[in-house]
Image: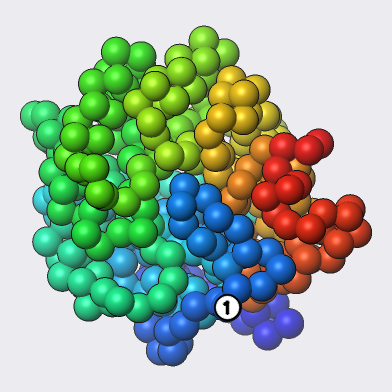
Amino acid sequence: MLYSLLRPALFLLDPEPAHALSIAALKLVPGGSQSQGPLATTVAGLHFPNPVGMAAGYDKDGEVPDALLALGFGFTEVGSITPLPQAGNPKPRLFRLSQDRAVINRMGFNNRGAEAAAARLAHRAGRPGIVGINVGANKDSADRVADYATMVRLMAPLASYLAVNISSPNTPGLRALQDEGALAALLDAVMAARGPKGPPIFLKVAPDLEPADIDAIARIAIDKRIDALIVSNTTISRPQLNSPHADESGGLSGAPLHDLALQRLRDFRSATGGAMPLIGVGGISNAEQAWQRIRAGASLVQLYSAITYEGPGIARRIVKGLERLMARDGFASIAEAVGTE
């Protein structure tokens, strides 16, 4: 209710300063994490108090993971973080599409680099709560596979899980790492860098994939023993949009991504045969959509753009709604409901 009153004023700000303001505000929130409740679930050996997570991109530098957990998220994913600091793409690079309840971004992995993030995240060592680290490669890197291996080695001691992001549309050539040969080589390097006792490895894929790509990625991910797939990142496609910034380049997220991301989740569920956990992302803004994603095969869900429109109470509202929907449909646990549509 309070956020709905504040939102018009916040939307008078350009999106990037508004985002920075939200991070600053969260630094005032006491950290905390959720206790185990009826939605608790286990994925890749990790025990999640609920299946609703904050996706990467919001807390790029790992500044407020514990505050996000205190808002009701069952887990949060910081990053993407690259080995060296980089400014990202020229501004403006972040656009609200208010009429479509969407966002277009072409940020370009702007972050302060691995050294700064590692120092910051080391200070929360020993605190409860699942904090994943999303890793990327520098735009001007001569060897992007080496960048990912470096990031995995650096961040493994600090991460509940590591998410390998090869699906951002805003770093030229990055999505080529989803090609069959390149992906196999990348995952070999990543798994070697992690070592036998490192955290789970999740792979984040794009929604803009052909059926053959989906089959190849699923096959390689299973063969390389990846722990989960995150489906999906933002899209370069453009459904019918009504907002003034609809023609901006970059990745589209929010409500218009919903149907495409849901279909890709179903595609990967079919391609993996249920042999690998999936994390559903894209266009989720309420409990019914989160529940649909779980029934379609997601063991966990994530959101980001929806918090722009729904406010910081969104995680608690979705969690409460999922409890109701799980009871309504007669399931004893989230795990029992996965893939039952």
Name the amino acid, label 1. Answer: Ser
Give the total of numbered labels: 1
Q: Is residue 210 left or right of residue 82?
A: right
Q: Residue furthest left?
A: 142
Q: Quadrant of the C terminus?
A: top right
The location of residue 2, given as percent across then percent down, is 68, 85
Residue 242 makes an appearance in the image: no
Q: Secondary structure at mark 1?
A: loop
Foreground residue among 124 and 168? 124
Q: Is residue 119 left or right of residue 240?
A: left
As displayed, is residue 73 above or below residue 142?
below
Residue at figure coordinates x 78%, y 66% from the top left: 323
Which picture quadrant has residue 40?
bottom right
Q: Residue at image x 13%, y 43%? A: 150
Q: Mark 1 = which residue?
A: 35
**Mark 1 residue crowding within 10 angstroms, few (<14) / some (14–19) / many (20+):** some
Work out whether 21 lies above or below 267: below
| Position in image of residue 8 (x %, y %) | 63, 74
Q: Is residue 188 visible?
A: yes
Percent coordinates x, y for residue 208 in the rendering: 52, 25
